[in-house]
Amino acid sequence: MTKFIPYGCQCIDEDDIKAVVEVLKSDWITTGPAVDEFEKAITEFVGVEYGVAVSSGTAALHTAMYAIGIAPGDEVIIPTMTFTATATAVVFQGGRPVFCDVDAGKLLIDPNQVEAKITPKTKAIIAVDYTGQTCQYDVLREIADKNNLVLVADACHSIGGEYKGQKVGTLADITTFSFHPVKHITTGEGGMVVTNNAKYYQRMRMFRNHGITLDQRQRCEKGQWFYEVEDVGYNYRITDIQCALGTSQLKKLPGWIKRRQEIALRYDESFKGLSEIQPLDVTPYGSHAYHLYVVRVLGADRNEVFSFLRDANIGVNVHYIPVHLHPLYRRHFGTKEGLCPVAEAAYIQILSFPIFPMMTDGDVDTVIQAVYEAMAKNT
Ligand SMILES: *Cc1c(COP(=O)(O)O)cnc(C)c1O
């Protein structure tokens, strides 16, 4: 039996370990210089003014919702083909996630359907760069501007990607990243929000630290111990230990994306010979960061193929169960089958294959061979 090949996996090398150990030996292990360095490294990489590092990608989304002022009753349009955190971030602020369908080829939010979902209560659109390719940001920007909405990018899949030569992180008013171990670079758990908006930046710095204001003038006048809690905030801080890992990981990101693209190309070439396996469409306008490699299984039962591959030690997965079908959203927001027919039809067919930088060509071929065997058995 071959070893288990997961769908995603972090890569930690000696440089990363050294960077973390240095922090452990220093005076600051949280909210110190390594946090600032990581924020600076990411904002320079992306080409954006401000970055606020937080404890997870989910915290980043929540922080972004706070920054843009989402409040009870507000509606935020999101694609249903995403992780639940995109929707719960809206709910955390008392808002209503309005689920939008996706296009059948790429499973990205369908701009044509976004417009139909806009009401007087709509405040924002969250575009999710599902699998690592960017949404149609110029179209979404036009819709947002015309309707006075904030455009948010959930770029948890797409750090290092591009849209029409512009980097992910600069495509929306505010952008979130995740540094969970299955994502492109990791801090164990962690996330960041990036923006060019100074007001959002100030609000986010406060929000991640209990809603405490950083007014230096007041501290000088009233004493160094003085602070004020200005709003409901959270402890969404990230540690220096984690951020040292993040800064070290970021150096390797471009090479890792290149490797992900090579793996995807190897899959693409092999599956040309297999009519039952149809990779999602790739946009002509971007650089795909390939967080996920997703195919549709046609003319065979996806669940049977899934089981066969799991039995063969291939860590296939399904991304995602359309979020509006989860009991929470059905119960609180009355969502049900038929709301997003394209995503629902895709959900029955999709399968994610292993993709991570440390996969060897041999590992990729092991997956491909198992897929061919699965098809011979199931069709
Ligand atoms: C991973 C992910 C999140 C949440 O990130 P965490 O760091 O796990 O909290 C949110 N949205 C999308 C699209 C993700 O893939």
Image (cartoon, grey):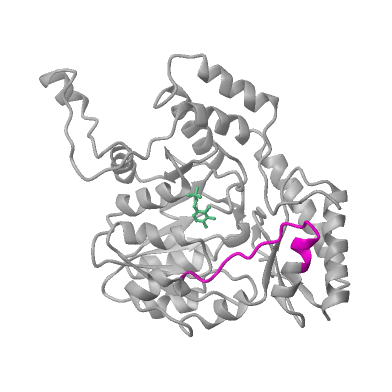
| Direction from residue 260 to residue 203 in the image, left or right | left
Q: Quadrant of residue 329?
A: bottom left
Q: Residue at 69% across / 67% down in the picture?
A: 351
> Relative to 108, is 199 on the left or the right?
left
16, above or below 106, in the image: above
Q: How many marks?
A: 0
Q: Main secondary structure of the magenta part?
A: loop
Compared with 39, 376 (above or below) is below
Which quadrant would residue 147 be assigned to in this image? bottom left
Image coordinates for residue 149, horizontal then vertical, percent: 34, 64
Q: Residue at x 67, y 45 (%)?
A: 9
Report the magenta residues as a range. Answer: 308-323
Q: Residue furthest left?
A: 222
Q: 124 or 339, which lies in front?
A: 339
Residue 348 image offset from top left, x and y in percent: 63, 77
**Residue lying at the far bottom of the rendered structure:** 338
Residue 346 at x, y = what percent?
62, 77
The residue at the point 49 percent across, 80 percent down is 340
- In this view of the protein, which residue sits in the foreground, 102 or 235? 235
The C terminus: image quadrant = bottom right
146 or 365, which is in the foreground?
A: 365
Q: Position of residue 175 (x, y in %)?
A: 45, 51
Residue at the (85%, 61%) spot, across then down: 368
**Position above or below: 71 against 170:** below
Using the image as rendered, state which of residue 173 and residue 332 is in the foreground.
332
Q: Quadrant of residue 141?
A: bottom left
> Is 191 contained in the magenta span?
no
**Relative to 183, 151 lies left or right:** left
